[in-house]
Image (tube, grey):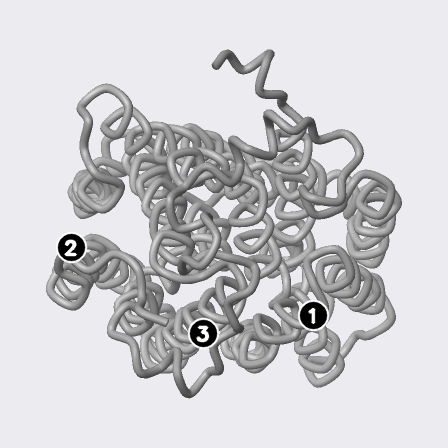
């Protein structure tokens, strides 16, 4: 059956969660381009910046404790809308503070509210797409993180120089309220949506587990956290996130500082290398969703095999980041390219690790499992900040050897994905769906 006969409204829904994720990442990454501004105007140290960053991650992790379960309970329409409203409010409120403690309070609130984005988005994809399209849909919406990271460096420095740093938070925070208008007009679950044809609904529900009485059926109960933690599939996802999410946090919060510190670029000059890294990662996000679909449709592989081989390929693509500093001594753009490839590989990995949740769990539990994994990913980011970034960066900058800190971090980046893949491989094995 052709796409025209099936219908395409599910891709409208995908575009909605793409824009939500874009806004989510704009709001969280604005502060990374204000680090030097706060050093000059508010007299922040590296430790102050790390404290604010860690506070965001702590509350993001706390938010994920309940966000998935809440969204599974409220449903995607209300849950996603509430989360976006609250994080947009917190983003705007950042303009009202000027102390480290004040920033910790509002950024903590931002983290708490932003925790709802990925559980909502993954649940939406599980509701609107059959398994073979989920990695592609996830890759597309997840590329919103890259677009957000591209838009931020190209706009925030301009806003800051023209109107001051407060307006960077106000203007970006207002974007969420614009998105809410379209969300409540355009969104509903497939079975209730007037713009979904019967052919498209049949395609969305075409997986075997969506047949009556099977694992994915709407009559299945939502699994509790206690039960979910008893499945090795939950731990495979959680450990994968624990080891790899901190790497993306590192890119988000420290890449501007890397280019400013290592190559003595001012904030406006550093914006272009950072934007290029995220432009490359956008390609990786979409390609990362396309590759397993290719393996399934063209090679006839199972979903599990296609997902695993794709993720192994992405893990190897991160390894060139080991040469970033050496290449940067030759030309800064060589460093940009290898970091960009690593960031692209991360986003390709991310598109697939998120999709493993809907591969292995009933739809009514996808947000909860995503929340558990996201919490572990945030915990990993907190530990990385506490025990590596905060102390290590402060120490090496003080003695004039900041490049050593970045060498260590790039080694951590390179090894994280292969380690995660091995652990996930041995935990999941050939298991597909959880037995409810």
Question: Where residue 132 sits: x, y (%)?
Answer: 38, 35
Query: Where the C terminus falls, by quadrant?
Result: bottom left
Front-most of residues 199 and 50? 199
Q: Are marks 1 and 2 in contact (CB under 8 Å)?
A: no
Front-most of residues 161 and 426? 426
Disc 3 and disc 2: Cα gap in Å? 21 Å
Question: Where residue 418 sits: x, y (%)?
Answer: 15, 55
Task: Return the residue at label 2.
Answer: 418
Image vertical order of residue 385 relative to residue 244, above or below: below
Q: State the mark number for residue 113.
A: 1
Q: Residues within 10 Å of mark 2 (few under 14, many from 20)?
A: many
- State the SS at label 1: helix
- State the SS at label 2: helix
Front-most of residues 345 and 235? 235
- Figure quadrant of residue 367: bottom right
Question: Where residue 370 sits: x, y (%)?
Answer: 47, 65
Q: Residues within 10 Å of mark 3 (few under 14, many from 20)?
A: many
Q: State the mark number for residue 372.
A: 3
Q: Earlier in the sequence, mark 3 or mark 2?
A: 3
- Figure quadrant of residue 116: bottom right
């Amino acid at each position: 059956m052709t796409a025209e006969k099936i219908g395409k409204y599910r891709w409208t829904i995908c575009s909605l969660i793409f824009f939500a994720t874009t806004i989510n990442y704009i709001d969280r990454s604005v502060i990374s381009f204000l680090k030097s501004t706060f050093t000059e105007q508010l007299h922040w140290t590296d430790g102050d910046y790390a404290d604010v960053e860690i506070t965001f991650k702590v509350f993001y992790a706390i938010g994920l404790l309940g966000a998935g379960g809440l969204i599974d309970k409220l449903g995607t329409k209300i849950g996603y809308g509430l989360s976006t409203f609250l994080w947009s409010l917190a983003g705007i409120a950042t303009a009202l503070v000027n102390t480290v403690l004040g920033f910790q309070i509002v950024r903590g609130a931002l983290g708490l509210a932003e925790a709802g984005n990925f559980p909502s988005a993954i649940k939406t994809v599980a509701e609107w797409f059959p398994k073979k399209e989920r990695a592609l849909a996830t890759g597309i919406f997840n590329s919103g993180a890259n677009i957000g990271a591209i838009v931020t460096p190209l706009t925030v420095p301009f806003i800051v120089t023209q109107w001051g740093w407060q307006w960077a938070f106000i203007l970006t925070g207002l974007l969420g309220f614009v998105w809410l208008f379209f969300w409540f007009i355009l969104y509903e679950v497939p079975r209730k949506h007037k713009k979904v044809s019967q052919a498209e609904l049949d395609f969305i529900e075409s997986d075997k587990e969506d047949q009556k009485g099977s694992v994915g059926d709407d009559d299945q109960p939502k699994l509790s956290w206690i039960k979910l933690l008893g499945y090795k599939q939950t731990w495979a996802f959680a450990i994968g996130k624990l080891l790899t999410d901190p790497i993306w946090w590192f890119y988000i919060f420290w890449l501007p500082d890397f280019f400013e510190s290592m190559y003595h670029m001012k904030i406006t000059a550093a914006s272009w290398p950072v934007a290029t890294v995220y432009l490359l990662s956008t390609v990786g996000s979409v390609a990362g969703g396309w590759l397993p679909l290719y393996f399934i449709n063209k090679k006839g592989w199972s979903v599990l095999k296609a997902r695993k081989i794709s993720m192994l390929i992405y893990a190897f693509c991160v390894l060139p980041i080991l040469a970033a500093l050496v290449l940067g001594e030759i030309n800064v753009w060589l460093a940009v390219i290898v970091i960009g490839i690593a960031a692209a590989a991360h986003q390709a990995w991310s598109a697939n690790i998120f999709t493993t949740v809907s591969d292995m769990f009933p739809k009514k539990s996808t947000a909860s499992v995503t929340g558990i994994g996201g919490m572990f990913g945030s915990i990993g980011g907190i530990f990385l900040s506490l025990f590596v970034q905060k102390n290590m960066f402060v120490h090496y900058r003080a003695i004039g050897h900041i490049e050593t800190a970045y060498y260590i971090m790039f080694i951590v980046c390179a090894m994280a994905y292969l380690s995660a893949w091995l652990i996930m491989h041995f935990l999941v094995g050939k298991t597909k769906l959880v037995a409810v």
